[in-house]
Image: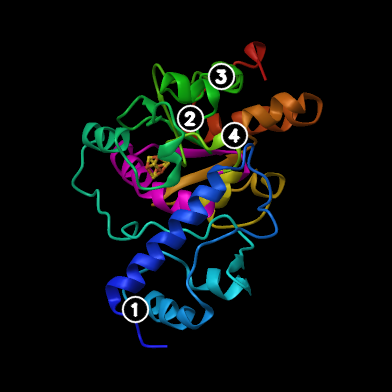
Amino acid sequence: MMKPDAQTVSAALARLARNIDEAERAMTPPSPLPASLPLDIPDDAFLPFIRDAIDGENPSVQQDSLEKGKEDGRQVQFLGASDVLFPDTEARDYSSCSLKELSTLVSSCKNCRLCETRTYTVFGEGQEEHPVVMVIGEGPGRDEDLSGRPFVGKGGQYMDRWFAPIGVSRQTNAYIANIVKCRPPGNRDPLPDEVQACIPYLRRQIALVQPRVILLAGAVAAHAILETKEGVGALRGRTFSYMNIPVIVTYHPAGVLRNLDRLRAPVWEDMKRLASMVGLPVHAGKKQT
Ligand code: SF4
C-alpha cells in the first residue's frame, strides 16, 4: 500500500476519534463498552501509518488504544472508554487568568466530551481569597448541572451540615469546586482523559484561591489529585501536599448518605481533624454528621 499523506492520516485519526466518541455517547447509562465497536477505519495495512502519526505530531488517539485494539476485519475492539484525548490539553496555560476569566473560559469550554451533555458548567463558589478550606469533589451531579452550582443536591446539603459544628461554610470561609466542571452522564465517574482535560482549570483555581487546607471528598477526587489508587479508608487520617498546600481526604457526602451507620463517625473525626489543622473550635454539641 502506498504511504498516505499526512492530511489523509490526520483525517483518519479524526474519524476514528469521532466514532469512538459517538459510540460512547450512545451508551446510557454508561456501562462497560460493548465487546466490539463498529469503527469505520481503513484497511489493516493503514494502521502502521496511523501509529506513525501518533508517534509523531498528532496525539488524538493514544498509542495503547491501538495496541489494545484487536483487529477483526473492519472492526476494532477497545478495552477502555478513555481512548480519545483532546490534543491541546497539555498546551493550555491559564497562569495569567483571574478567577473570573477562568470561569468565563470554563463556561464555554469544549475540551472534552462532557461539554456535549452538560446543562451548565459548574465552576465553583465560596470564599475566593484564602479560605480555611477548599473542598474538591469529583464532578457535578444532576442538581448541580441544572443549577450551575457545586454541591447543592442532597449530598451537598448534607456536607454543609458537616461543617456547621466547626464554623466552616461556603458563605464565609470555604471554597467548593470539583475535579471536572461538567456533569458526567448518568453520574458516572469522570474518565481519565476528562480529568486530564479539566484539571488545569482546577490547578489555576487552587493557585488563585490559595486555601489553607484542601479537603478531597471521595475516591475520584483523591485519586485525581494524589495520583494514587488507595481507597479513602486508607487515605483519610493522613496529610498530603498538593501545590504546597496541605491535603486531607474524607468520604464523599453522597457515599456517606448511602452508608450512614458506617461512615458518619469517620467523617466526624475528619471534620475535627480539619478544625484542628486550621485552628477552629469544635462545637461538639452542634455535631450534625
Ligand atoms: S469537563 Fe472540563 S474540560 Fe470537559 S468540557 Fe467541561 S469544563 Fe471543559
Residue matched to label 1? 56
Residue at the limit of the structure toward the left, as seen here? 96
Q: Left or right: 128 with respect to 81?
A: left
**Which comes sooner in the sequence, label 3 or label 4?**
3
Magenta part of the protein: which range?
190-219
Q: Secondary structure at mark 2?
A: loop
Q: Secondary structure at mark 1?
A: loop
CB contact under 8 Å: marks 4 and 2: no
Q: Residue at x 52, y 20 (%)?
A: 143
In this view of the protein, which residue sits in the foreground, 43 or 14?
Answer: 43
The image quadrant of residue 46 is: bottom left
| Alpha carbons under labels 3 and 4: distance apart | 13 Å
Question: Is 185 covered by the magenta stretch?
Answer: no
Q: State the mark number for residue 187.
A: 4
| Alpha carbons under labels 4 and 2: distance apart | 35 Å
| Alpha carbons under labels 1 and 3: distance apart | 45 Å
Residue matched to label 2? 279
Above or below: residue 55 compared with residue 147:
below
In front: label 2 or label 3: 3
| Alpha carbons under labels 4 and 1: distance apart | 35 Å
Circle 1 packing at 10 Å, graded few (<14), some (14-19), many (20+), is few
The quadrant of the picture occupied by the C terminus is: top right
Res 275 seen here: yes
Say what amino acid the circle numbered 2 marks.
Answer: Gly
Residue at the limit of the structure toward the top, as seen here? 285
